[in-house]
């Protein structure tokens, strides 16, 4: 279909950790290119790449020093162009990250701003301000911990809502608008099919940069109305191309109606659904999130998206094995008691739930292998600035970024062919988690994902479209139909439940108990008749 993003299964590639083609211990574009057949066989429709631009890697590439090139550790611009073409030849579209809220302190613009001094044109591209007394201009806090302001050598302060090496760009300056419009065209002209927009809600700051008075209320640097005009500018650029180019927003917003405003027909095409990701493994709460999500998207005719994990959050196999199965940045529950057996069983059921819901779905690399969070990384090897800026009180996000295991029975598990240790160490227990060991095993997580993604393409009711809840279900059971014939049933109760009337079992996340669905198990069915909705 022309609006391909409405029901796409999109696979997230964190390049450093996907596959290492040159054997230096860091993933790269050569590694990705060598594994494109694997992704095609998995059954995904598009790849979303985390930032692949030149970067000092203070924040995993989200500190960009050049938006029009490739990080040399990853490869070259020519190689990226080959990758885009090779993916297209396999029917896979390419989405790349864009980071418009900030850049690296090594970006030429910021180096010029430091050199030019107060009052210069160069500093107007950023948020340089004089301090308040002996301190920063206001009380804003970095999302990575500590003050959001750092003092330049000449005494002025500059704003960084993230690391001190990620100065915020000033979107009141026309030069910033012009720069990013050119960056969009640069990559669109090379065949990129879309952009995932980092911190999409944060570009516009309240005039005067006032203090935060209520940390739990509306913030003067998030979700201001002026941000929408930026995305209208961007949408006009995307729509100027003959084939469909798309924008995907990253916004952590508590208000579903405010969230949906970004998805109006002249703004972004879709956005990540973090309420679903953060939701505990609870039938009532999950149904509330699904209903609220679909209700918020309906007025703007935007497709919902469903995601369980990404490069910022604790992997869901680990989350689902805990007493508290929700996710919050305020408490990653590091070293909380975890049953990986329970977490894996629930993750298998969650995969079928996610891939049966209306709209698009995102798969974070390694979730198709059932990888858990790696929580026992040595402190001296952690690289996330969250860990250093909070002095270890927040262990950060490295545990979900450990390089993938492809083959073999010991590290580096085929991540490279040279035996070079990966940039983050892999557990010694991952031999049974490799692509090689799971391929062909009908009980493996990998084959469950392959089967589900194949059915998702062939079942007419799946992907975009309506959802009707099946009535009269036991407590703790989610059950819905997509077209009257296809049904998904998930048992989150503590007892087996009877399957609804059906003509065929298409796929189950675990063994069934005769005609009963065990706890923490999901099943896809064909029904004989169209049920009434509730």
Image (cartoon, rainbow, N blue to C red):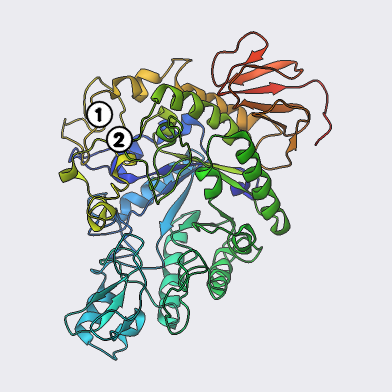
- Residue 529 position within the rendered picture, expressed as x and y whole percent measured from the top left: 83, 24
Report crowding for label 1: few under 14, some 14 to 19, many 20 or more residues within 10 A (C-alpha): some
Q: Which mark is residue 427?
A: 1
- Residue 2 position within the rendered picture, expressed as x and y whole percent measured from the top left: 64, 49
Report crowding for label 2: few under 14, some 14 to 19, many 20 or more residues within 10 A (C-alpha): some
At 55% from the left edge and 48% from the top edge, which residue is drawn? 275
Report if the CB atoms under discs 2 and 1 are less than 8 Å apart. yes
Query: Which one is nearer the viewer's eye here, 301 or 394?
Result: 394
The vertical placement of 267 against 309, above or below, is below
> Does residue 200 appear in the picture of this structure?
yes
**Mark earlier in primary sequence (2, 1):** 2
> Does residue 2 appear in the picture of this structure?
no
Q: How many marks?
A: 2
Query: Which one is nearer the viewer's eye here, 130 or 32?
Result: 130
The residues bearing labels 2 and 1 have C-alpha atoms spaced at a distance of 7 Å
At 43% from the left edge and 32% from the top edge, which residue is drawn? 322
- Residue 402 position within the rendered picture, expressed as x and y whole percent measured from the top left: 29, 38
Considering the image in quadrants, where does the N terminus appear? top right
Q: Which residue is mark 2?
A: 374
* Quarter where residue 454 is shown: top right
* Quarter where residue 165 is shown: bottom left
Tag 2 secondary structure: loop
Query: Which one is nearer the viewer's eye here, 466 or 395?
Result: 395
**Relative side of 467 to 347, left or right:** right
Considering the image in quadrants, where does the C terminus appear? top right
**Relative side of 355 to 178, left or right:** right
- Residue 308 position within the rendered picture, expressed as x and y whole percent measured from the top left: 49, 40
**Relative side of 475 to 243, left or right:** right
The vertical placement of 8 against 128, above or below, is above
At 46% from the left edge and 51% from the top edge, which residue is drawn? 95
């Amino acid at each position: 279909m022309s609006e391909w993003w409405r029901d796409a299964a999109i696979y997230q590639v964190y390049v450093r950790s996907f596959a290492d083609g040159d054997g230096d211990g860091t993933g790269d574009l050569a590694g990705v290119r060598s594994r494109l057949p694997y992704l095609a066989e998995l059954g995904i429709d598009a790849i979303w790449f985390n930032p692949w631009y030149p970067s000092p890697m203070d924040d995993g590439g989200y500190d960009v020093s050049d938006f029009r090139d490739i990080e040399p550790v990853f490869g070259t611009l020519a190689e990226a162009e080959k990758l885009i073409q090779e993916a297209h030849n396999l029917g896979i579209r390419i989405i790349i990250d864009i980071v418009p809220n900030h850049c690296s302190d090594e970006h030429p613009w910021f180096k010029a701003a430091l050199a030019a001094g107060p009052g210069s044109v160069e500093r107007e591209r950023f948020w340089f301000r004089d301090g308040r007394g002996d301190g920063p201009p206001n009380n804003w806090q970095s999302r990575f911990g500590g003050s959001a302001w750092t003092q330049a050598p000449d005494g002025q302060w500059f704003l960084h809502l993230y690391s001190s090496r990620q100065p915020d760009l000033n979107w009141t300056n026309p030069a910033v608008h012009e720069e990013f419009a050119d960056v969009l065209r640069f990559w669109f002209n090379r065949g990129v099919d879309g952009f995932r927009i980092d911190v999409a809600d944060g570009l516009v700051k309240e005039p005067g940069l006032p203090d935060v008075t209520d940390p739990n209320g509306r913030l003067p640097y998030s979700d201001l109305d002026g941000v929408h005009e930026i995305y209208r500018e961007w949408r006009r650029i995307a729509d100027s191309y003959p084939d469909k180019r798309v924008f995907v927003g990253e916004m952590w917003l508590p208000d579903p109606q405010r969230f949906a405003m970004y998805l109006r027909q002249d703004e972004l095409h879709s956005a990540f659904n973090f309420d679903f990701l953060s939701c505990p493994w609870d039938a009532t709460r999950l149904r509330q999130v699904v209903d609220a999500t679909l209700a918020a998207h309906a007025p703007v005719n935007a497709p919902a998206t469903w995601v369980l994990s990404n490069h910022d959050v604790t992997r869901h196999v680990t989350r689902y094995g805990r007493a508290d199965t929700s996710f919050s940045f305020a408490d990653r529950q590091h070293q909380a008691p975890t049953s990986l057996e329970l977490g894996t069983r629930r993750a298998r059921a969650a995969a079928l739930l996610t891939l049966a819901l209306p709209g698009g779905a995102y798969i974070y690399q390694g979730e198709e292998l059932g990888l858990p969070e790696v929580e026992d990384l040595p402190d001296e090897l952690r690289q996330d600035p969250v860990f250093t800026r909070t002095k270890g009180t927040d262990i950060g996000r490295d545990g979900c970024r450990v390089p993938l295991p492809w083959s073999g029975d010991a590290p580096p598990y085929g991540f490279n062919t040279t035996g070079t240790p990966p940039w983050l160490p892999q557990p010694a227990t991952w031999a049974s988690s490799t692509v090689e060991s799971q391929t062909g095993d009908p009980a493996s997580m990998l084959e469950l994902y392959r089967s589900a993604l194949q059915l998702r393409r062939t079942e007419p009711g799946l992907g975009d479209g309506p959802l009707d809840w099946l009535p009269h279900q036991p407590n703790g059971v989610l059950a819905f139909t997509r077209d009257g014939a296809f049904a998904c049933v998930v048992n989150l109760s503590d007892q087996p439940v009877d399957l609804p009337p059906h003509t065929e079992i298409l796929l189950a996340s675990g063994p069934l108990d005769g005609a009963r669905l065990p706890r923490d198990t999901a099943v896809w069915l064909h029904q004989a008749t169209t049920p009434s909705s509730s």
